[in-house]
Image (cartoon, rainbow, N blue to C red):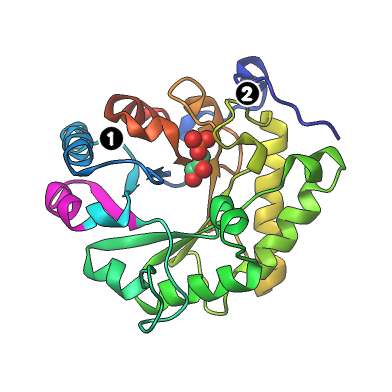
Amino acid sequence: MRVRVPGRETDNCRATAMPPESRHRRPLLVANWKMNGLHADGLALASALAGHAAAGEGGDIVVCPPATLLFALRAVFAGSAVALGGQDCHTAAAGAHTGDVSASMLADAGCTHVIVGHSERRAGHGEGDETVAEKAAAAHGAGLTAIVCVGESAADRDSGHALTVIGRQVEGSLPDGAAPENTAIAYEPVWAIGSGRTPGPADIAAAHAEVRAGWERRFSGSGAALRVLYGGSVTARNAGEILAVPGVDGVLVGGASLSADTFWQICRAWR
Ligand code: 13P
């Protein structure tokens, strides 16, 4: 199967769009700032977003800044509708792990969520499914919701193995004890991240269905309550259409979350 790209497949998206009133739960809208944001810029971005969020109607919003900004942003988001998340955590609760951050440190800094298994961690730090599952377990142990990332490479999709890879990653990356109350899964095709390209709505729907099927195989139970997010080149322009694809319960946003106005448009796009 070829990667279907053209970044903004508005017509296709409309074809399978589900009316907003048929959605059964509030979406989870997550900003992943990645390694961007010095103190002053991060504060300004967070303050602007908190101002927007005061108006409400944005869904469940989580901002995942660099770890250096967590304590400062905790103060900015205090009392607002915006929650705080980490971008990664170590598998261990504490110890001799230079440069790493534990899940309990994130909780201590005000986080309620943490991303684990992002493809940039999998590729850049050699993290496999087993490690990701251990990180998710560490997150749960600290009372955090784990946002577990999965997604196929361009080669996987081109060779027709995308769904197999996604299902295998889901089954391998979830620890015992994962439940819809403490876990969300983000489907992020590697080739869509930062590329301006997105899968068509049918491919997103199929991937999300496979995520839920993988969950059901792993836990022999229903994945209906699980929130499955889409990530990869989400913009203010395509967010409404992506959020309307059946099985999409939110988005994980990188580059477009670095503008408060743009991210807020994305947060409101489901309405
Ligand atoms: P972009 O939105 O920049 O494509 O990044 C997606 C992502 O990796 C979010 O975790």
The circle drawn on residue 161 is none
What amino acid type is highlighted by mark number 1?
Glu
Q: Are marks 1 and 2 in contact (CB under 8 Å)?
A: no
What secondary structure is marked by label 1? Answer: loop
Residue 73 in the magenta stretch? The answer is yes
Q: Which residue, as the protein is rendered here, is positioned at the far bottom?
A: 95
Please determine whether, in this image, residue 189 is positioned above or below residue 184: above
Would you say residue 218 is visible in this rendering? yes
Q: Quadrant of residue 13?
A: top right
The numbered mark, 1 or 2, whose residue comes first in the sequence reads 2
Tag 1 residue: 57
Seen from the viewer's position, the closer of residues 202 and 189 is: 189
Tag 2 residue: 13
Would you say residue 249 is visible in this rendering? no
- Where residue 136 appears, as percent x and y from the top left, is 49, 70
Q: Is residue 41 left or right of residue 268?
A: left
Q: Which residues are magenta?
A: 71-85
> At 24% across and 42% down in the image, what residue appears?
38
Q: Quadrant of residue 168?
A: bottom right
Instruction: Check the picture and name the quadrant holding the C terminus.
Output: top left
Seen from the viewer's position, the closer of residues 139 and 89 is: 89
Please determine whether, in this image, residue 55 is positioned above or below residue 7: below
